[in-house]
């Protein structure tokens, strides 16, 4: 595209650039976003379906997790990508509610389209939505139920609801129990409450066995074997040395020559080297260590001497695992062997190499009050283990959410219906077009109970009407019970969810909808051509075309 400026033809947009504007641009973006929301609708809730995703290499993922499904879908359209971002943000911030957030964003856009068709200006829609969003968050806080942050019973219910919609739902009690124990164990007391870093819970998965072989380890599980066959495979009452220096004689950095004239000299040289290595082991043993975890390599000779002293050692352990080991065993990481003191050693009841499926793993367990833990996830096939890992991730996140911010709301669409009612009431005070947008926001929230009903084989419209009516007559927690296929009080069924998850879903959906509605011009450069000269960056090709004119 070029224009004439002062008698000269100036290139504004390079050739091949496509441009859509105004309503057309908005319409195209909304359509693309809706496709994404539509594609994961059927996976919402305990009766939601799973998706099977096959990638370019034929690898299969089976999942019900919104973030995972969208991540695997390899979405191209920029507006559709925004929806994928919604799921990602939701996952990063609170770990659950990804499908909900995407569905909500889709419905906000859908309703916005309807309003714009009725000549409501996008800015009015955006303003109305942002008013409604702020109110939604205010009302959510208002209706939330405060719970004790370490109430195991409540935390288990929360964990089970998040697992209920996953492939592994039959084992939700078992898995939920592990999640609650793990989070409470690693929680750190702060001035006013608790802080929880989920990264202190290491989740390792190995296909094989069954889901109920999944275990919580009071310590750290290393995907490593004991380094030398002569070493013990099991050590009790461990005193653990954590080293991040190599147990080797470091090779000179430059090529260097050593002149040896006779065998005598050679022997002396080797003896000297052996002596240094032996001293390393002597030092470790003299401080009382019987387990060595090393981030770097361990020389064969050192391994041999360690084995003689009944020391168990693993090498090339990841830095993140070393850090977890300090939190679990109380050991200090040592960078120079000479500095090692008995007081730097960590404690664990047992260190043992065990065979898990076909691999050997080292369990460092029975730590006293460990602030880092491991979960070993087992399950029949690789796909089951993968989805189980995702379910455990969600469960750990929701439990953390409540421990950190101890408020819950009720699921099954009860919360969404209740705040929709409150938002509508608030909207009555507003004028004209703003009110329309606020109402549209409230209606969008109610798609959650509708889809839950639809996925459970219930009539979505009738079910919503029934839920709404109950809310009108002050039954705050009326919602959809998908297992019975009817409307009931979900608080009586113990369907609780973290307040943080619902707040974040409203925020991320509102943000994405607002962002897409603000766009009225889409300018897309043509894909850079990959000619004989190899791929060209956009800058190069633009320059070339400029010169051609
Ligand atoms: P998300 O990715 O949004 O978490 P899910 O597939 O996990 O999606 O479904 C979550 C929805 O299912 C929430 O609205 C939650 O309240 C609802 N839900 C989960 N378990 C139950 C249950 N037992 N009864 C009713 N609703 C439930
Ligand atoms: Mg969920």
Image (spheres, helix red, strand yellow):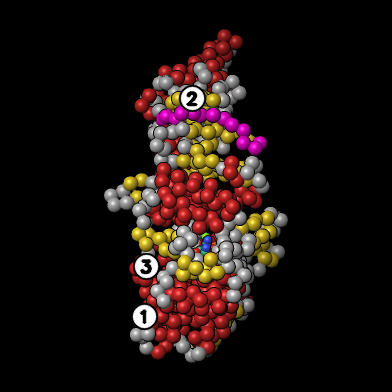
Which of labels 1 and 2 is toward the front?
A: 1
For label 3, the residue is: 143
The quarter of the picture where the C terminus appears is bottom right
Determine if the magenta segment contains residue 351: yes
Residue sitting nearer the eye, 73 or 165: 165
Tell me where residue 53 appears, x and y as whole percent.
Answer: 66, 60
The residue that label 1 is drawn on is 426
**Residue 278 image offset from top left, x and y in percent:** 49, 17
Q: Nearer the viewer, residue 545 or 142?
A: 142
For image coordinates 36% across by 56% down, the residue present is 147
Residue pictured at 49% horizontal, 31% vertical: 293
- Secondary structure that dominates the magenta span: strand
Quadrant in the picture for residue 210? top right
Residue 236 badge: 2
Quick one: SS at disc 1? helix
Quadrant hosting residue 72 = bottom right
Residue 76 in sight here:
no
On the picture, is 255 further left or further right than 491? right
Give the quadrant of the N terminus: bottom right
């Amino acid at each position: 595209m070029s224009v004439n400026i002062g008698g000269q033809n100036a290139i504004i947009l390079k050739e091949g650039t496509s441009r859509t504007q105004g309503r057309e641009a908005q319409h195209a973006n909304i359509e693309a976003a809706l496709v994404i929301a539509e594609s994961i609708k059927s996976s919402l809730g305990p009766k939601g379906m799973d998706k099977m995703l096959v990638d370019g290499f034929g690898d299969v993922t089976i999942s019900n997790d919104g973030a995972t499904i969208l991540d695997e879908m390899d979405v191209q359209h920029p507006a559709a990508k925004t929806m994928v971002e919604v799921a990602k943000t939701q996952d990063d911030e609170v770990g659950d509610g990804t499908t909900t957030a995407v569905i909500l964003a889709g419905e906000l856009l859908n309703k916005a389209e309807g309003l714009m068709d009725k000549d409501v200006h996008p800015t009015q829609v955006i303003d109305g939505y942002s008013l409604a969003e702020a109110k939604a968050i205010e009302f959510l806080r208002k209706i939330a139920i405060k719970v004790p942050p370490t109430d195991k019973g409540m935390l288990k219910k929360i964990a089970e609801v998040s697992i209920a919609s996953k492939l592994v739902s039959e084992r939700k009690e078992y898995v939920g129990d592990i999640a609650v124990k793990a989070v409470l164990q690693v929680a750190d007391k702060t001035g006013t409450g608790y802080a929880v870093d989920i990264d202190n819970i290491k989740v390792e998965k190995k296909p094989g066995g069954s889901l109920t072989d999944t275990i919580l380890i009071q310590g750290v599980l290393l995907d490593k074997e004991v380094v030398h066959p002569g070493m013990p495979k099991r050590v009790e009452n461990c005193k653990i040395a954590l080293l991040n220096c190599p147990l080797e004689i470091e090779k000179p950095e430059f090529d260097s020559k050593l002149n040896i004239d006779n065998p005598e000299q050679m022997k002396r040289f080797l003896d000297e080297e052996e002596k240094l290595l032996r001293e390393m082991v002597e030092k470790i043993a003299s401080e009382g260590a019987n387990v060595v975890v090393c981030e770097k390599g361990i020389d064969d000779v050192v391994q041999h001497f360690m084995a003689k002293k009944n020391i168990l050692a693993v090498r090339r352990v990841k830095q993140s695992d070393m850090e977890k080991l300090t939190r679990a065993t109380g050991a200090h990481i040592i960078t120079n062997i000479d500095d090692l003191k008995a007081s730097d050693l960590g404690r664990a009841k047992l260190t043992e190499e065990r065979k898990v499926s076909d691999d050997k793993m080292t369990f460092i367990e029975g730590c006293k009050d460990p602030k880092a833990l491991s979960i070993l996830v087992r399950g029949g096939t690789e796909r089951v283990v993968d989805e189980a890992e995702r379910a455990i991730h969600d469960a750990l996140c929701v439990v953390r959410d409540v421990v950190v911010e101890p408020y819950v709301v009720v699921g099954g669409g009860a919360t969404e219906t209740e705040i929709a009612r409150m938002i509508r009431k608030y909207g009555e005070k507003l004028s004209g077009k703003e009110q329309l947008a606020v109402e549209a926001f409230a209606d969008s929230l109610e798609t959650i109970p509708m889809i839950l009903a639809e996925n459970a084989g219930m009539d979505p419209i009738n079910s919503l009407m029934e839920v709404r009516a109950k809310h009108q007559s002050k039954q705050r927690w009326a919602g959809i019970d998908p297992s019975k296929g009817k409307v009931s009080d979900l608080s009586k069924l113990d369907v609780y969810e973290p307040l943080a998850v619902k707040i974040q879903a409203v925020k991320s959906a509102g943000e994405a909808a607002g962002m897409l509605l603000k766009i009225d011009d889409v300018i897309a450069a043509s894909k850079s051509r990959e000619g004989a000269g190899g791929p060209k960056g956009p800058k190069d090709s633009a320059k070339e075309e400029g010169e051609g004119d």
